[in-house]
Image (cartoon, rainbow, N blue to C red):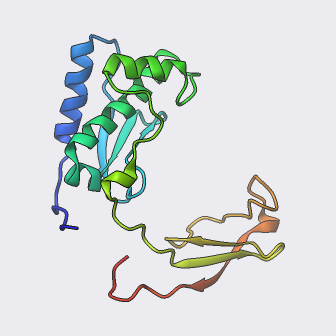
Amino acid sequence: MSALPRRASAAPWQDACRQILLGLSLPVSVPAVRLSRRMTWRLGSYRRDRHEIALSYWLVAQHPREALETLKHELAHAIAYQGAPDSRPHGAEWRRACQLLGIAPERCSSIARLGPPRRPRPRYLYACLACGQQVVYQRRLRAPHSCGRCDRRYNPRYRLSLVAQLPAPEGGGS
């Protein structure tokens, strides 16, 4: 895989979003667009609370055509939510928005055919002291987490404890 450019701007993607919405003449505010270097497995996401679309930096740098499709997919979420705030993420309103945008109403793009970067190896091993359930994370937990097997909601009685920091892969890569 070739090295990714050090800098990429979200501005062209923000402009593309604006142009798409202007072309459709929809009374929808343009969501903020940002690029995320942390998104290596997901191609994009839409956050309702921030009215923000995040695109994978890797996707934008390596596959701009797919990035445009992903932008439209996430824009469909913004359109659906602004039109019907109680709508389901991939429900009828979202499917209608996909049709307006001229994209197939598919839940997921096939990331496998794009050949995504390797997923970073988990580096931290945590365990529930109550049931022994082990969970691995790529980053050290900053806030307390509890065992999902013991209680679906956070419960300090089932707080996860750091058991081990796993060795980095040979060669220093992720």
Q: Residue at x 24, y 22 (%)?
A: 20
Q: Position of residue 85 (x, y in %)?
A: 54, 21
Q: Residue at x 27, y 13 (%)?
A: 24
- Residue 36 lies, with reference to residue 15, above or below; the image says below
Front residue of this view, candidates 147 and 106: 106
Which image quarter: residue 1? bottom left
Residue 7 lies left or right of residue 118; in this view the side is: left
Which image quarter: residue 134? bottom right
Q: Residue at x 34, y 59 (%)?
A: 116
Front residue of this view, candidates 119 and 163: 119
Front residue of this view, candidates 49 and 166: 166
Q: Residue at x 78, y 61 (%)?
A: 149
Q: Position of residue 167 (x, y in %)?
A: 49, 88
- Residue 18 lies, with reference to residue 24, above or below; the image says below
Number of residue marks: 0
Image quadrant occupied by the C terminus: bottom left
- Residue 155 lies, with reference to residue 67, above or below; the image says below
Which image quarter: residue 29? top left
Residue 173 lies left or right of residue 94; in this view the side is: left
Q: Position of residue 91 (x, y in %)?
A: 55, 24
Q: Position of residue 119 (x, y in %)?
A: 42, 67
Residue 48 lies left or right of residue 25; in this view the side is: right
